[in-house]
Image (tube, helix red, strand yellow):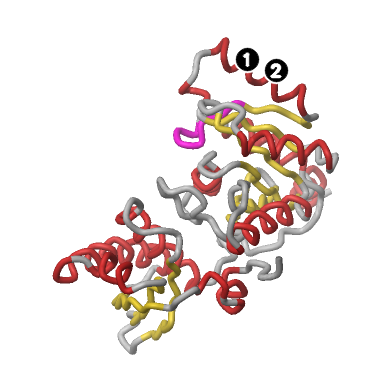
Amino acid sequence: MTADAAEGAVQAPTRSGFVALLGAPNAGKSTLVNQLVGTKVSIVTHKVQTTRALVRGIAIHDRAQIVFVDTPGVFAPKRRLDRAMVRTAWSGAKDADIVLAIIDAERGITEEVDVILKRLEERKLKAVLLLNKVDKIKRDRLLGLTKEITERAEFAKVFMISALTGSGCADLMDYLAAALPEGPWYYPEDQISDLPLRQLAAEITREKLFLRLHQELPYASHVETELWETRPDGSARVEQTIYVERDSQKRIVIGHKGETIKAIGQAARKEIIEAAEQTVHLFLFVKVRENWGNDPERYREMGLDFSG
């Protein structure tokens, strides 16, 4: 047997699969996906429910390709957009090979967590429990919380982690890499997300919008990349439109003498350049589109189900 043949004989098979994160808003799902993938693929803000559609981040660990699906937070829906986001979250969980139920240990069993635990039990969905932000609470309280949660629903495994610092994440990755089914990888080795670049750029700008205006601006805002034009010198002209529902919101986004939208554009441009790996000239426009939250086309663009 040649050296190459010997090496091939002992090489472990490749594994691949989809891992969905399910949790209440601001439980740390987007932060965890970014931590496990090793770069930003999902937006993170102080404002809850900023993840609207299914965002996939792709990581390689050992010989496994792990496709993380960051779902919208599960909460009590009040509007059509809310209902679409919650349906999308449970749909993502249903279609995944492994479900990670992430719970903010500092907050404990909130109303949203209570709903998730009931739904997991009803659907006989055996998820992996992730207790996040464990560095923020005392050990006795953490153990009591773990006991209470695991009595409410059956879990395949329990991990205590910090999505922000990465504590406990190496053990989680080892587990996922071994637990996924054998099979070829779904994506090229160097791909970190399945979001088209235009959509990723829109998400980056939406994050900067929320970070800057999370107290003044309601959820009635949406960002679309209208133009991505590569110039002869290799740079790109990118035009994006921020849609809001009222003129008063438009004035907030633009700010005094255009200072707010300029700051949003500068912050977004920096990250879009990193994502695109090319020079980007970013132009932002603000338009009023009344009642966009009931526009079927907007839902299709976000990958959400309009019905219901």
Tell me if residue 85 is in the magenta stretch: no
Residue that extends furthest to the top in the rendered view of this protein:
140
Q: Which contiguous range is marked in magenta?
A: 160-166
Q: Of residues 278 and 299, which is closer to you in this image?
A: 299
Q: CA distance from mark 1 to mark 2?
A: 6 Å
Residue 86 lies, in percent from the top left, at: 65, 54
Tell me if residue 161 is in the magenta stretch: yes
| Residue 256 position by quadrant | bottom left
Q: Which residue is mark 2?
A: 147
Q: Which residue is mark 1?
A: 143
User: Callout 2: helix, strand or loop?
Assistant: helix
Q: Of residues 146 and 100, which is closer to you in this image?
A: 146
Q: Of residues 274 and 185, which is closer to you in this image?
A: 274
- Main structural element of the magenta stretch: helix, strand or loop? loop
Q: From where the camera sits, is residue 44 visible? A: yes
User: Callout 1: helix, strand or loop?
Assistant: helix
Residue at 55% across, 75% down = 298
Q: Amino acid at mark 1?
A: Leu
